[in-house]
Each structure stands twice: as structure tokens, then as C-alpha cells.
Image: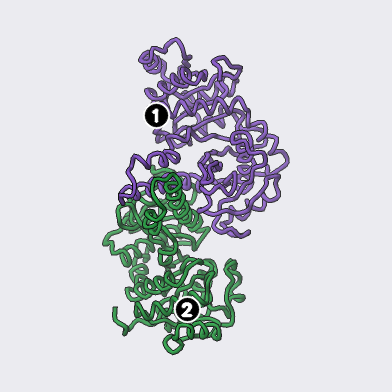
Chain colours: A purple, B green
Amino acid sequence: MTPRTTVPPVVLDAMGGDHGPAETVAGAVAAWRTHHVPITLVGDEPRVVAELRRHSASGEIAVVHADDAVPMTERGAGAAALAASSLAVGCDLVGRGLGGAFVSAGSTGAVVSCAVRGIGRAAGVLRPALAVALPALTGGASVLVDAGATADPSPAMVAQFALLGVGYARAVLGRPDPTAGLLSIGSEPGKGNRLTCQSAELIAASPVRFHGNIEGHDVLTGVVDVIVTDGFTGNVVLKNVEGCVRTALTMVAQAGIASPDRLAEVARRYDPQTHGGATLLGLRGTVVVAHGSSRAATIARACVVAHALAAQDPAAGIGAGLEGAATRP
Amino acid sequence: MTPRTTVPPVVLDAMGGDHGPAETVAGAVAAWRTHHVPITLVGDEPRVVAELRRHSASGEIAVVHADDAVPMTERGAGAAALAASSLAVGCDLVGRGLGGAFVSAGSTGAVVSCAVRGIGRAAGVLRPALAVALPALTGGASVLVDAGATADPSPAMVAQFALLGVGYARAVLGRPDPTAGLLSIGSEPGKGNRLTCQSAELIAASPVRFHGNIEGHDVLTGVVDVIVTDGFTGNVVLKNVEGCVRTALTMVAQAGIASPDRLAEVARRYDPQTHGGATLLGLRGTVVVAHGSSRAATIARACVVAHALAAQDPAAGIGAGLEGAATRP
């Protein structure tokens, strides 16, 4: 990647996450200096500039002031309350074409709320969905979608999540003809709750290459390219994966079978710090939500992913795939 | 445990599971000969008696004939279709007091359907729930409830699941004052989907010692005694735990960090074969649903657990705990 690029800068929320602005600004400096990703920082200007000075980088990275930061406990309050926040100001920049992507380690609910308002949904999309690439036992990855953007979707929304996930798998994972499985409680057709039973019918009637139902034990096996679910189940499963892998490795260490050091490489594959972020699909611009606990290296990686996604424009394919399928509310 | 007991026999579905009646009858023989648990087998009499003869046990264990077996793909069809099945006949025996508990490795949906009809719900219980004890990193266990009996519960049903789970933790795990956490997508109050937000308010107003929300990464940490969730999410999480632990250990083995043999002990803790079964709570008699893939040893263990549960009568405490709390539909 060269320092000069035609893709607009990544807009980074300097105030988001548990460790902003110190770690976010450090991440911005790393993204620019190491990975040559152009960054615009949004946040409380005096604090952001002070952090930039600590890295002797006050002339290198643009800063746009925002009056407020959104507390991490914020659960997507009224848009009015967030209007002066770094989230709203940052998304507005992307919505006006002044940034190619938006990155935040803030509260997922608040990011989704501001992104829908400031960037807007792609044509025909009912609700956005979070996509997270989970490493598969086969060595590849599967995309979990929705990993937490829409907690109470309708069946039509879930069917769209399948289409959005397929678009992501094509654009980001490079799969030419991705398969999608619906996460349920039995592999046979008709097993599930009301939402999955109705969603399965819509997905089967859509252009998606539908594998049918998959179950909880299939999540890490790579049996499908796209794991489709509602945002509640997806978020519980995402965090359960992290917790279970950590627990299994801790038990191996406690049993004296292997040292924690030797297990660290396996642990790192499933550490939220190394995912690089979740991608919000279904908007007119790329949005990457990094984990709230992200440190500088994770923020930098999220900026690199966002920059690459913006350059590939996965939303174009996603928008096309949605035409004429499962767009009823 | 002595061979002579005042507790009525465990009624065992000889036809259930992927390996019935060969493995179920072998399990019955082991439960009786090794663990002194009295068993009544229900199923196709000629086949069951033939299996008993292979163990020279045709005079030791009672057999009650049932015309039909329920296919494992059965998803709880109309009760009429199941009326002559080993499930229906077995549950009817327990309902009439001729058995203290019912054990089956059959389809969970069909077992729940037959048990509700043949054994009946305990007073005030809206829907039954499956409880599964998950080993915790702390060395103890947490009860996951509902692990798959009721896929679409109302908030009042979820609040009852909390009460049922607390009764199980008291009666089976020996916790004097169990804590319960609601599985959701954020630890802060108010985070979740519609179902969990409404359920949290009902649980907080019930006699349950409510920890508040827990998240997917808390499932194996032992942070609460009872993990409360709907039957859809619970079943996905239960299978996800099994799959993730297996995947993590496979990766450790593939990385050459430890041999598969040395990891087998850790794997065994999370193997569904060793859980001994899930317990259906909220009925007037004990029901244990063993995994469909159960072999003889797992069936025998399920019978031992069912026998112990019937002797302790956990339902009595559960029924009392439900009085006056969260019993609206």
C-alpha cells in the first residue's frame, strides 16, 4: 500500500472505547505511519491535539472537533442527545463524502444509531447488521451476521442479513459463491423458534445459496461461509465463543498439559483484540466497530480493515444482491 | 446406595436415541447391576426381550410393551400420532405413579410433548424447561435453563425458568441460596432484546436472588449458579459450548502443543456423552433427556441421576418457590 491514495481518509472516533483518546490517537498515528492509512480524528480538539503532540504528530493528522463523547454505557439514546458527539460528527463527515469509512470503539448501540442517521442505509436495506469474521477450524473463516446490531429483527430483516453476509464474504473473504446457514436448534427444516422458521422460508426463496439450518456446534467448523442469525443470538454466540475458547485453554494450562505461553498463539486467534473489529453492513459507507477494550494496535488494525473495505466498496455488490429479494418489512 | 429402595423404578424408553434398543437395554442392565437402580423398560417387547437375553437379564428387568418408536427426526407431532409410542406409554406410567422418573434419549421435542401430556405440569408452571449442568472454570457447575424445551417463551415463562433453575440448583447441586443471571447482550440493566428486557423486570420482582444480566463470555465462568435464558438461545449456547471447547482442544493438538490423549480429560468434561442428561423441570415427575447419541454408559448414568432426583423430589421445592411469583401467562 502506498502513502498516496484516492480513497478518502478513515474517520476515527478519538473519544470511543475504554481507553480513548490516548489509545485511539496512538492507533491513528500507527495506522498512518506504519500502514499509510490517511486518518481524520474526531473528538475534543484540545485533548486530541495534546495526545498527538505526545507522538510529535500534531501536523500529520487532521482533527475535527466534536463537543461531546458518548459514554460507553450509552445504549443508543435519542439522536438529539448524541448530535454533538464524536460519533455523530464523524458519521456526518462520511455521509457527506469527506471520509471513506468510520471507525469507533464506542458503544455498538450508539455507533449503529449515529451511523444509520449520519451515513444512511443502502437502498432497500431494512436494518443494518454487524459482521464478524470467526476463524474456522478448517483454516479459513466464517462470517457471523448479525453479531449485535439489531436485537429484534423481523424474518425479512434476517433474510437480508443473509444477503448482506454473502456480499461481505464475496468482497472481504474472496469467496466467489458463498454458502449461508441459518443458526437454529436442529438441522432439520422446520426446527427453530418462530423467527428462524419464518426466516428460513424467506432465505430459501432468495438468491442466497442456502445450506439450511446449522447448530451451535457448527459455528467454528467452517461448514458454511456465512452464519446467519438475529443480533441477540449472534452477540451471545460471539461472546460465548470467546469465553469458551479462553476457558478450554485455561483448563489445559491448569491441568499442567501445556504452559500458558505455548497456548497464547491459539488464544490470540479468538481474542476480540485481534479481530480488528466488526463491520456494520447495509449502510452507504463502511463502518467498523472495534471492541470497547481496544488498545492502539487494535485500533490501527481496524483502520486498515476499514480503509481496505472502503477501497473495495463491498456495499455496491450488497446493494445489488438485495434488489427484489426479501425487502418487505 | 442399597439394592432395595422405596422409590419406584426409573422408566426407561428402550426405543429412544440413535442406538436403541441395543444400547438402551445395555444401559438398563448396567444401571441395575452396577448401580442398583430399579428399571422398567418400555418398547417393542420382542426386540427388548431379545436384547435382555443377550445380557442374560430377561428375568431381572420388567418390560412394558409399546407399539411404536418415535423417529429421531420427529419434532413433536400431534399427541395422537405419538399415543402408542414408547415415550407416551412410559410417561403415562410415571403419571400413574408406577415409575418415579422417566429417561429417554429420544427427540427432545417429542419427549417434552409426551411428558407434558402424560406426566403433567407442576401446579402453576406455564411451560417446562430443560436444565443442563455446565462445568464451571471454578470447579463447580452452573445450571443452564432453558436449554431447549420452550423455543418461544413469554417473559413470564422466562421468569419461571429462573425459579425452576434455582430449585434445581438447591436440590441437585446443593447450593443453599443460588444466584441467577439472565443471559443477554450487555451487563447493564436494559440491555437485551424485548424478551430479556421484560423478563429481567419480572425476575427482579420475584423471590429469585437476581444477579442481573450476564453475557455469552460468562457462561463457563461460574459467576452465577443459574444461567436463565429462552429455550432457543439456551440450546444454541449449549451446543456452541460443546463445539468451541472441542475446536480449541483440536487446535491445541494440531499446533503440536499437546497430544490428543493428554487433552482427552479436558474434552470429556464438556462431552455431551458425559453430561448424563438434561433434566426437564416443571413437571409432576422427574424426566431426564439423554443425548441422542448416547451409548450404554451414558444411559446408565442418566438412570442414576433420574433415580437420585426422584428420591430428592426437587419438584416439591420448585412448586413452592413458584407460588405467587411470575405465574401470569
Residue drawn at (48%, 83%), measured in percent from left and top?
B54
The disc label shown at residue A295, or none:
1
Count the labels in the image. 2
Which mark is in front, 1 or 2? 2
- The label shown at residue A109 is none
Q: CA distance from mark 1 to mark 2?
A: 58 Å
**Which quadrant of the figure has residue B209?**
bottom left
* Along the viewing direction, whichever of A98 and A85 lies nearer the viewer: A98
x, y percentage for residue A146? 55, 42
Residue, far top = A59
Q: Residue at x 38, y 49 (%)?
A: B258
Q: Position of residue A67 (x, y in %)?
A: 43, 20
Please give the residue where the numbered disc 2 appears in the rendered image: B25
- Residue B219 vs residue B50: left or right? left
**Corner quadrant of residue B322:** bottom left
B97 vs A32, nearest the viewer: A32
Expressed as whole percent of the image width and height from the top left, the position of residue B313 reads: 34, 73
Parent chain of label 2: B
